[in-house]
């Protein structure tokens, strides 16, 4: 019912080899939709009012795993670490934050094509409308991209099986510049060896849509650059040392305190059963710390992924 009540703000078709920078305001929904099926969509995202805050695949991957989907957030990079977009709906539930954007270098080095459509060049051109440079392109959130990780650690791309109408709905948690592009990989399994158009829509979210978003707690440790000792954006390209620099690292010096723990015979036997001698040898202190903090993680850690807990439990 909520989808039928949404007000359409904008709608367009992205042709192969192209992308589009779109202003999506807080409370609006960006829909990325298959026009004919089996097309990967690369995606960049910036805070509309501060381009230095951008979507961070590493942080998103840490919070939600290799394949974020419905109920997950797209997070910005440290130190801000804000939820930028919420995946309100995902009809396919196959997305990727492992693989970087494809580039001209990739196609020449791996495939022998010195001229080829590629996601970096497409992103750079689409973002140029807002004054962003090729250096501002960041790693893509890859919608509809099917990836797997083998036991030996190798990541692979597999064929997708999407159809026309399959879509992802992203609800903006802040004003963002969202830049989807039609992935330029037609010689890979990414989009089943072809390039197809993609449909893009922006809607006003309904009250029901907004109510579906879990609360995201604000951490005391979340900061903005103005809270650091050097908040000025560097305007020159060359890197030179500041002759007046004096290190002032936060939370230093580190203070260590030695605590003696007495174990009786039964406790010593239990300790030996759990001590990782393969890692720590005869260092009882290191072995005990490992046991203690392993227990502490299981008992007290708010979120094993390193994300703030949300009401839905998706980010824990």
Image: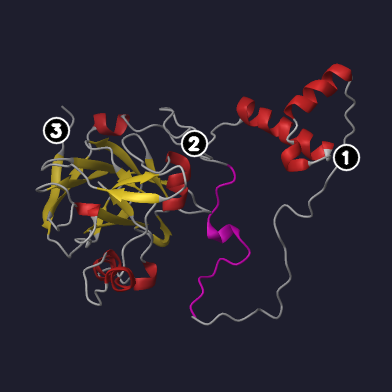
Q: Which numbered mark, 1 or 3, is in the foreground of this view?
A: 1
- Please report whichever mark, 3 or 2, sits nearer to the chain's N-terminal start: 3
Badge 2 element: loop
- Residue extent of the magenta highlight: 220-236
The span from disc 3 to disc 2 (Cα, nearest Å) is: 29 Å
* Residue indicated by mark 3: 5
Mark 1 and mark 3: Cα distance apart in space: 63 Å
Q: Residue at x 24, y 53 (%)?
A: 190
Earlier residue among tags 1 and 3: 3
Q: Is residue 178 left or right of residue 36?
A: right
How crowded pointer 3 is (Cα within 10 Å; few <14, some 14-19, many 20+) is rated as few
Instruction: Give residue 217's mark.
Output: 2
Q: Which color scheme did the rendering employ for the protein?
A: secondary structure
Question: Does dot 3 land on a helix, a strand or a loop?
Answer: loop
Q: Main secondary structure of the magenta part?
A: loop
Residue 65 image position (x, y, % from top left): 43, 41
């Amino acid at each position: 019912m909520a989808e039928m009540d949404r007000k359409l703000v904008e709608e367009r078709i992205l042709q192969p080899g192209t992308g589009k920078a779109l202003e999506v305001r807080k409370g609006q929904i960006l829909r990325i939709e298959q026009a004919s099926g089996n097309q990967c969509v690369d995606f960049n995202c910036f805070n509309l009012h501060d381009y230095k805050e951008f979507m961070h695949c590493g942080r998103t991957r840490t919070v939600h795993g290799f394949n974020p989907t419905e109920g997950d957030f797209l997070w910005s990079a440290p130190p801000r670490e804000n939820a930028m977009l919420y995946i309100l709906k995902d009809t396919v539930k196959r997305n990727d934050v492992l693989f970087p954007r494809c580039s001209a270098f990739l196609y020449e080095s791996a495939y022998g094509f010195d001229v080829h459509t590629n996601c970096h060049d497409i992103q750079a051109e689409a973002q140029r409308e807002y004054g962003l440079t090729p250096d501002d392109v960041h790693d893509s959130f890859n919608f509809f991209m099917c990836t797997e990780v083998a036991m030996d650690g190798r990541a692979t791309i597999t064929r997708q099986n999407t159809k026309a109408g399959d879509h992802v709905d992203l609800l903006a948690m802040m004003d963002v510049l969202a830049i989807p592009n039609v992935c330029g990989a037609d010689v890979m399994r990414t989009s089943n060896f072809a390039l197809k158009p993609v449909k893009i829509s922006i809607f006003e979210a309904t009250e029901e849509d907004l109510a579906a978003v879990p609360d995201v707690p604000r951490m005391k440790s979340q900061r903005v650059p103005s809270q650091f000792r050097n908040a000025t954006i560097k305007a020159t390209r060359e890197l030179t040392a500041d002759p007046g620099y004096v290190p002032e690292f936060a939370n230093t010096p580190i203070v260590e305190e030695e605590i003696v723990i007495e174990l009786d015979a039964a406790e010593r036997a239990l300790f030996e059963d759990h001590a990782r001698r393969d890692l720590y040898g005869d260092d009882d202190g290191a072995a005990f710390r490992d046991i203690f903090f392993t227990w502490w993680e299981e008992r007290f850690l708010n979120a094993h992924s390193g994300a703030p807990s949300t009401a839905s439990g998706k980010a824990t």
